[in-house]
Amino acid sequence: MLDWSREDLAAKSGVSRPTLADFETNKRKPYERTLADIRRTFEEAGLEFIGENGGGAGIRFKARKDGTQGEH
């Protein structure tokens, strides 16, 4: 959605690239604090996390002030 590389996410979130790679390959389980850092980074980039509401959890771009959605 954001067209970020692992290196981009690492730089923006403060979570190291090797740590992110370990999460992706299930070699390590993230701490809650680390998940919060990653989530905050995505939210600051304009993404919104959607809870399970019968249709399943997901992520989307936040609505713009003009009421439309899309890339910010």
Image (spheres, rainbow, N blue to C red):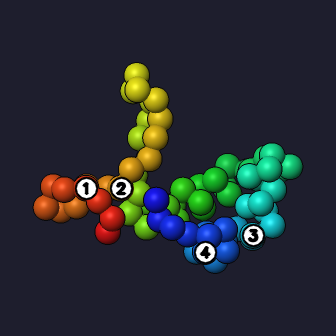
Residue at image mark 4: 8
Could you tell which of marks 3 and 1 lies nearer the N-terminus? 3
Q: Using the image as rendered, state which of residue 37 and residue 25 is in the foreground.
A: 25
Looking at the rendered structure, the kind of residue marked 4 is: Asp
Look at 80% across and 50% down and name the residue there.
25
Residue at position x 67%, y 49% from top?
32
| Residue at mark 3 to residue at mark 1: CA–CA distance | 30 Å
Q: Amino acid at mark 1?
A: Gln
- Mark 3 — residue? 17
**Mark closest to the chain's N terminus, 2 or 4:** 4
Tell me if residue 41 can be seen. yes
Report the Cα–Cα distance between label 3 and label 4: 9 Å
The answer to which of marks 4 and 1 sits earlier in the sequence is 4
Q: CA distance from mark 2 to mark 4?
A: 18 Å
Q: Which residue is mark 1?
A: 69
Q: Give percent across and percent down for residue 58.
A: 46, 41
Residue highlighted by disc 2: 61
Label 3 SS: helix
Residue 41 x, y percent position in the rendering: 52, 65
Where residue 67 sits in the image (x, y, percent)? 15, 55
Task: Identify residue type, mark 2.
Answer: Phe
Residue 47 numbered mark, or none: none
